[in-house]
Amino acid sequence: MPSPSIDPKACTSLLVRATRQLAAAGESLDRPRDVPAGIDWIRKASRKSAQGLRGRLDALYPAIGWMEEDGAHAGTASTYWLYDAIDGAYHYLQGLPLWSSSLALVHDDRIVFSAVYSPSTKEVFMACEGRGATCNGKQIWVSSKTDLRSAVAGTAVAPVLQVGRSAQARALECVSAIAPQVFVLRAMASASLQLAFVAAGRLDLHWETGLDAQDWLAGALLVREAGGRASDLSGATLSAQSEGIVAAPASLHGTIVALLHSASLTSLAIREPACSVAGSPQTGSPQ
């Protein structure tokens, strides 16, 4: 089935508008003193933003469905919008920069359009399947590095209160496997924004563990359209059910996958139940 016809610039503009509204709300936010209150605020803000954006997209493309917070598809099951209002929820709550919002269009289990907006840098990253990736309208490409020893790597380690001790321990084992092999490691931004940085060659690679594919899919298309590879931790095709992501130029991707495999970290299912403060898929990665 052919991909639906959309106006990428119009869709991206709607994303930017919604994100700027969230940024303005964050500037006047009386920051919650505890984690559960913060997560509750993020959920409410994300839900409100999603309702507004969905209404505007529905008016333009009534036949395209929507991914609900519980993972169910509303509307056409094979074609739907995937929106992450606040990726980097704790950055947002703490008043730190480098959180982002992302929007992706899924068609027949493929991401065919994606946009990531960084309000702190005012940068829009956008990609359409088969048409390349851009930052503020200019073509971007992944890094040309071939030596892991010179690579700048990005990752994230989720808080124990959100994912449980065993899942956090697995993430830290990944850090132990990769950090000695690269030049420097940074956990510096939301997942979708770090993936955008890989697409733009600012980070040479990014990997992450867990079950946050909704945070990764928009950025994964950016990486692929910028000439890189984005897969699950074993090197297989990334999907909404993937446990972890590796994104890098082809020259580095296989090496990272091999390092994770050698450390017996390709099976990272979260076995320990997360605590009650865990965010919904709409809250974004807690970076």
Image (cartoon, rainbow, N blue to C red):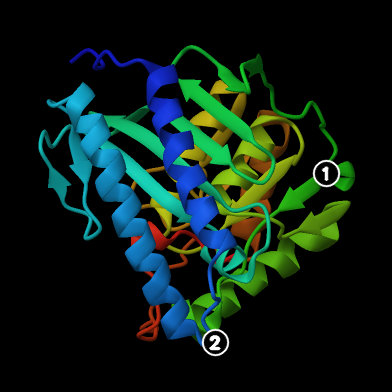
Classify the position of the C terminus by image quarter. Answer: bottom right
The disc labelled 2 sits on which kind of residue? Arg
Q: Quadrant of residue 96?
A: bottom right
The numbered mark, 1 or 2, whose residue comes first in the sequence reads 2
Position of 70 relative to 231 (above/below): below
What residue is drawn where x is 63% and y is 62%? Answer: 156
Camera-nearest residue between 257 and 198: 198
Q: Quadrant of residue 90?
A: bottom right
| Left or right of residue 263, residue 72 in this image | left
The disc labelled 1 sits on which kind of residue? Ala
* Marking on residue 33: 2
**Which residue has dot 1 on it?**
151
What residue is drawn where x is 51% and y is 61%? Answer: 285
What residue is drawn where x is 13% and y is 26%? Answer: 62
| Left or right of residue 101, residue 187 in this image | right
Q: Residues within 10 Å of mark 1 (few under 14, many from 20)?
A: some
Camera-nearest residue between 122 and 193: 122
Classify the position of the N terminus by image quarter. Answer: top left
Q: Secondary structure at mark 2?
A: loop
Q: Secondary structure at mark 1?
A: loop
- Residue 233: tell me if it is visible: no
- Residue 160: tell me if it is visible: yes
| Left or right of residue 105, residue 15 in this image | right
What residue is drawn where x is 63% and y is 70%? Answer: 94
